[in-house]
């Protein structure tokens, strides 16, 4: 079992990194969990009345982290309801997911949203090294999240769900958004690392034949699934990623190399934990 002292060093053949937005660049868990509780508690109370059953409220740690963290909304709410032995038609699931999205954005616009400190530090190191960066998301509001988190200018390319209709790009698990980002980065997929927390995002990266697929498992429950969907390595936090020591890249290309070694983190980087959602 890998310890927190293990550091993954990107090979110097990696010329660019594409970051997922939710859970990788910005910490969405607090706002998302609060929105789901606001949506699901009234639903569960009403359902309990109609079924003459005991009302059991939505629990952030057991329910959100156990069934919904890192998943698309529809998949997450379906998994949660299955855990309660509740089956709903697709349109009802979509209605719950849509209401949660509205409340999530209201929460973000009211209270703001923060980037992960370790991600910001890695981004600074990546840009100092001469590598290019992109932020990619299937969500239509991802650009707003980056702006509110104050990290927009740290990316050479930003691509989200609003771009997909205009370019006719399919969302994850198809690799279209990542491939479009690679084109805009002017970098071959084989020289790009992708960092994602969702299973669909990891699958998309693998289908696109990208040079390195890094899965992020912040709560320690999805490592096996991330590997099954195509992650080359799984980390708990981006403080575990390092760049090669030495000068910046000069257009060199050599076979991809991933090194797991015990070493110190990027200068100034300390591991961060997921914000409490309780």
Image (spheres, helix red, strand yellow):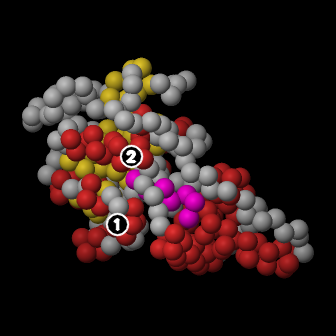
Tell me where residue 238 appears, x and y as whole percent. Answer: 41, 40
Residue 135 at least partly seen: yes
Which residue is painted at 85% across and 78% down in the image? 49
Q: Is residue 26 magenta?
A: yes
In the picture of the structure, the residue carrying the numbered disc 2 is 119
Q: Which residues are magenta?
A: 25-31
How many circles with numbers are drawn on the protein? Answer: 2
Which residue is painted at 73% across and 64% down in the image? 58
Quadrant of the rendered image containing residue 138: bottom left
| Label 2 close to label 1 by CB (< 8 Å) | no
Q: Is residue 174 magenta?
A: no
Q: Split into 4 quadrants, where in the image is the C terminus?
A: bottom right
Tell me: 149 left or right of 72. left
Tell me where residue 80 appears, x and y as whole percent. Answer: 67, 60
Q: Residues within 10 Å of mark 2 (few under 14, many from 20)?
A: many
**What is the C-alpha distance between the residues marked 2 and 1?**
15 Å
Circle nearer the N terminus (2, 1) = 2
Tell me where residue 175 appears, x and y as whole percent. Answer: 32, 55
Which residue is painted at 17% across and 58% down in the image? 184
Tell me where residue 111 appears, x and y as whole percent. Answer: 51, 69
Tell me: 210 left or right of 54. left
Residue 233 at least partly seen: no
Task: From this view, report whether residue 273 is shown above or below residue 248.
Answer: below
In the picture of the structure, the residue carrying the numbered disc 1 is 147
Which residue is painted at 73% across and 71% down in the image? 41
Q: Residues within 10 Å of mark 1 (few under 14, many from 20)?
A: few
Judged from the image, the secondary structure of the residue bearing numbered disc 2 is helix
């Amino acid at each position: 079992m890998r310890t927190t002292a293990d550091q993954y060093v990107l090979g110097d053949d990696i010329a660019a990194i594409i970051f997922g937005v939710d859970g990788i660049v910005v910490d969405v868990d607090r706002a998302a969990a609060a929105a789901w509780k606001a949506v699901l508690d009234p639903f569960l109370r009403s359902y309990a009345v109609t079924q003459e059953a005991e009302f059991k409220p939505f629990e952030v740690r057991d329910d959100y982290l156990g069934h919904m963290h890192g998943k698309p909304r529809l998949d997450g709410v379906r998994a949660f309801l299955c855990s309660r032995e509740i089956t709903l038609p697709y349109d009802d699931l979509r209605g719950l997911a849509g209401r949660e999205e509205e409340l999530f954005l209201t929460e973000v616009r009211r209270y703001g949203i923060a980037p992960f400190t370790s991600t910001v530090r890695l981004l600074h190191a990546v840009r100092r090294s001469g590598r290019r960066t992109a932020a990619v998301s299937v969500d239509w509001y991802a650009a707003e999240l980056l702006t509110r988190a104050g990290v927009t200018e740290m990316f050479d390319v930003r691509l989200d769900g609003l771009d997909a209709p205009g370019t006719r790009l399919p969302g994850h698990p198809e690799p279209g958004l990542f491939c479009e980002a690679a084109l805009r980065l002017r970098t071959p997929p084989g020289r790009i690392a992708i960092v994602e927390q969702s299973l669909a995002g990891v699958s998309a990266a693998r289908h696109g034949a990208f040079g390195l697929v890094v899965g992020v498992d912040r709560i320690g429950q999805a490592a096996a699934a991330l590997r099954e969907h195509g992650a080359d390595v799984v980390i708990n936090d981006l403080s575990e990623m390092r760049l090669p020591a030495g000068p910046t890249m000069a257009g060199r290309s050599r076979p991809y190399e991933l090194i797991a070694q015990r070493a110190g983190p990027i200068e100034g980087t300390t591991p961060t934990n997921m914000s409490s959602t309780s």
